[in-house]
Image (tube, rainbow, N blue to C red):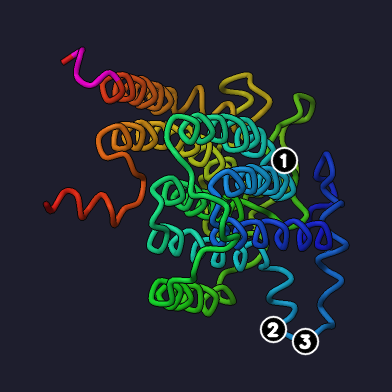
Amino acid sequence: MSLLGFTLAAFVILTAVATALLRDTLAVIILFAAYSLGMALLYTLLLAPDVGITEAAIGAGVTTILLLVTITKTTRPGAEEIFSAVNWPAATVSAGLAAVLLSVVGAIPAGNFLGGTTPVTGAAGTPGEGVTGHYLAASYAETGVHNTVTAVLASYRGFDTFGEAVVVFAAGVAVVVVLHRGDFV
Amino acid sequence: MTALSAPGGGSLALSALDGVATVPLALSALSTRYAYATFALLFAIGLYMMIASPNLVKKVIGLNLFQSAIFLFFVSMAYVRGGAVPAIPSEGGAVGAYASPLPQVIVLTAIVVGVSLTAVALALIVRLYTEYGTLNEETIREVMDE
């Protein structure tokens, strides 16, 4: 677990740094697709295969296609320089944020922050125990769905998912309106 | 951890993480919380790209990187050491430790909303290019000020 996790974490950090520093937008987009694939594997390793599959399909797939279509319709900075110059004020701000976040990482309870043990085996005393434990214990009996993530997404939070579909529809309308230069308004 | 009866790969994560108790404290804190450390670094890199890149497409890529770092934070919070994927077997019900499904559901919703946001941002970028002929933030600002 930990060796694979470290490897994937190092991979996503390296691809992210290269994404930030390279100048050619096409290279950045390809690296970002590789980064998304690494993130999908990391999510899967952290017991979230549903998130991993969605990230692989949407982050590495749809987002990459959208970015490639955008640079074919517009322009990309030429390849006369491989790296873009480092913006030191921005780098200082970002490094400060990273330092603040890293200094509080040690205070986070490792391994079981929100996760739940089902009431069958007794409480483990984590903050999310009651709520998570309820869904884990009752979701199959109440919805008949084996995957608790699917049960919560489609049954308990069905209206929330409907709102998500409305957001996607609104985004599609916005793209059509913006690209057709007001023919529809 | 009392995860011995967790189905489906529950014992997979157990041995590797519990074996690090003997190494120095800071190193062991990093080894059990490496996902949080990764989150902090990716978050900062995404912020840097959004501030520093003059190219608008790279700014949008930085925004996506920033987002996926937050998703990693949520997924790390849901993780349970020695736990199982939150899929309940039908026979016998759920027994043992499972990752929390609730942050994972929020992240699923956020990924789809994020790609909608990216699509609108890229459409605006294409429109800006047809109006100004450049994707450089500084140049666009100079042309707008004239």
Quadrant in which the C terminus of chain A is drawn: top left
User: Which structural element holds mark 2?
Assistant: helix
- The quadrant of the picture occupied by the N terminus of chain A is bottom right
- Using the image, determine if residue A145 lies above or below residue A56: above
* Residue that appears at 43% across and 62% down: B47
Image: B28 above or below B142: below
Residue A134 located left or right of residue A13 = left
Q: Chain of mark 2?
A: B
Left/right placement of residue B27 relative to residue A26 reads right
Q: Which mark is residue B85?
A: 1
Look at label 1 and name its amino acid: Val
Q: Nearer the viewer, residue B129 or A35?
A: B129
Amino acid at the residue labelled 2: Ala
Which residue is located at x 48 percent, y 40 percent? B106
Crowd band around label 2 with a 10 angstrom C-alpha radius: few (<14), some (14–19), many (20+) = few
Amino acid type shown at disc 3:
Pro
Q: Is residue A96 magenta?
A: no
Where is residue A165 shown, x and y percent of the image? 40, 22
Choose top left, top right, bottom left or bottom right for residue A160.
top left
Span of residues in magenta: A180-184
N-terminal label among 2 and 1: 2
Q: Circle 3 sits in a helix, a strand or a loop, which is it?
A: loop
Q: Chain of mark 1?
A: B
Find disc 3 in the rendering and name its residue: B24
Q: Chain of mark 3?
A: B
The residue wearing badge 2 is B26
Q: Is residue A119 visible?
A: no
Q: Residue, x 74% and y 50% (percent of image)?
A: B83
For the view shown, which residue lies furthest in the left direction? B146
Do the residues bearing badges 3 and 2 touch, measured as CB atoms within 8 Å?
yes
